[in-house]
Every structure is written in structure tokens, then in C-alpha cells.
Image (spheres, rainbow, N blue to C red):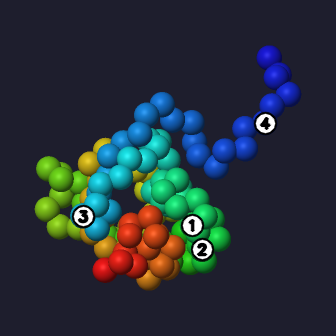
Amino acid sequence: MYTGRVDTSPFRPYERLVAITILGKKFDVPEKNILLRCFQYLSPETIPYGRFCWNQECQTCRVAYRIPGEQEEPRQILTCKIVVREGMEITELSTELTWNLKRSLKLDSQ
């Protein structure tokens, strides 16, 4: 049944938040979303305006990540390509992501 409402949320539908770690700090983000979208959830005032193509071409959203218990060494991945998982650890951020997330991660106070 058509309700006349259009969902304008940038996030895929989710029922719960999952815990991830970014540079040693814990955050809760929406499940079933790509990692770049989860970064937007944490920093809605900067990530949408960052220099990201959102389609795997620009490479500016590259991070190193690992899943504890599954991977020993971090792997490089584009955040616009991978869906977030519970317990994911982000160990490195690209320069563009670092700049756009610095307030949310409280990096400017270091």
C-alpha cells in the first residue's frame, strides 16, 4: 500500500547497531550498511561533503581493517565496498577519512 512517504534516509534499513573499533575507539553503527555510510552516521556534517566517489573509483576511502578471531593481519579495503560487521577493527584511515572523522574520533585533541 502506498503511503505517500518516501524514505530519504541515506542508510539501508537496520534494526540494531553493531560495535566497531576505529583507531582503538569503540563506536556503535547501523548494521547492514557499507562502512563509509557508517562513517557518515558518526560524522553526518563532514562525510557527505568529503572527496569520496562512493563507487570504488577514487580510492580515498581506503582503510586497513581486521575481524578479531578471523584475521591476524589487517587488510586494505575500500569503505564504499564492504558491509560493516560486528567487532570490526579499523586500524588505519586514509588521509581524507582522517580529516573528515577527526571531530568524531576526537583526533584534533591529540
Which label was assigned to residue 24?
3
In this rendering, is residue 36 above or below 61? above
Q: Residue at x 44, y 73 (%)?
A: 102
Judged left or right of residue 10, residue 89 is: left
Q: The residue under label 2 is which amino acid type?
A: Gly
Q: Secondary structure at mark 4?
A: loop
Q: Residue at x 57, y 66 (%)?
A: 47
Q: The residue under label 3 is which amino acid type?
A: Gly
CA separation in Å, label 4 and label 3: 37 Å
In this view of the protein, can residue 30 be seen by the observer?
A: yes
Judged left or right of residue 22, residue 5 is: right
Q: Secondary structure at mark 3?
A: loop
Q: Secondary structure at mark 1?
A: helix
In this rendering, is residue 91 above or below 40? below
- Residue 27 rendering spot, x and y as whole percentages: 35, 52
Which label was assigned to residue 6?
4
Q: Which residue is mark 1?
A: 47
